[in-house]
Amino acid sequence: MYCRVISKKSRFLVLAGILIFLISGNLYAQLSGTFTIGSGGTYASFTDAVSALNSQGVSGSVVFNVLTGVYDEQFEIGTINGVSGSNRVSFQAQTGNAADVTLQFSQTAGANYIIRMNGSDYITFQNFDFAYKVFIILSYEQKSYIKYI
């Protein structure tokens, strides 16, 4: 019978490698469910919510209920991991009244948008107002699953 003895150093290197492999992925859970955007909500701003979407992805449908207010922001929604026809992302006024939520941005030369959709799909904006007619820029890779209701 052949028995090989593994040194402490070898065991440590193997365990360290396994540990690095396990924690090297995304340390945050993917988003799924209903969240709130606004002062006192899950996310203070659209920028914070979109940052979580872009970095964490989704594992189910995600709804962002937006608290009443005027939001002066500019942000980009990139390719969201996990999004699909059954795992959609929606942004909507919490009250259901479009007059209660306004999304705007003080436009500057070269940055004339509120939301830039850069490879994102299956996104719905519902029941709120945009302060400008041209509010979304779609990237050249954009698919057709973006809705504004």
Image: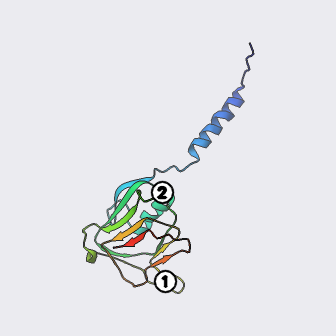
Which residue does the image show at 35% across and 63% down from the upper left? 64
Instruction: Quickly name the residue at label 2.
Output: 57
**Residue 89, position as x, y percentages in the image:** 40, 62
Amino acid type of the residue tagged 1 in the rendering: Asn
Q: Decide: marks 1, 2 in contact (CB < 8 A)?
A: no
**Residue 115, position as x, y percentages in the image:** 45, 75
What element does badge 1 sit on? loop
Task: Determine the residue located farthest toward the top in the rendered image.
Answer: 1
Q: Quadrant of residue 13?
A: top right
Q: Quadrant of the N terminus?
A: top right
Which residue does the image show at 36% across and 67% down from the upper left? 91
Binning the other alpha carbons within 10 Å of mark 1 as few (below 14), some (14 to 19) or many (20 upward) gives some
Q: Quadrant of the C terminus?
A: bottom left
Mark seen at residue 9: none
Q: Is residue 13 above or below residue 52?
A: above
Instruction: Quickly name the residue at label 1.
Output: 112
Amino acid type of the residue tagged 2 in the rendering: Gly
Gap in angstroms between the C-alphas marked 1 and 2: 27 Å
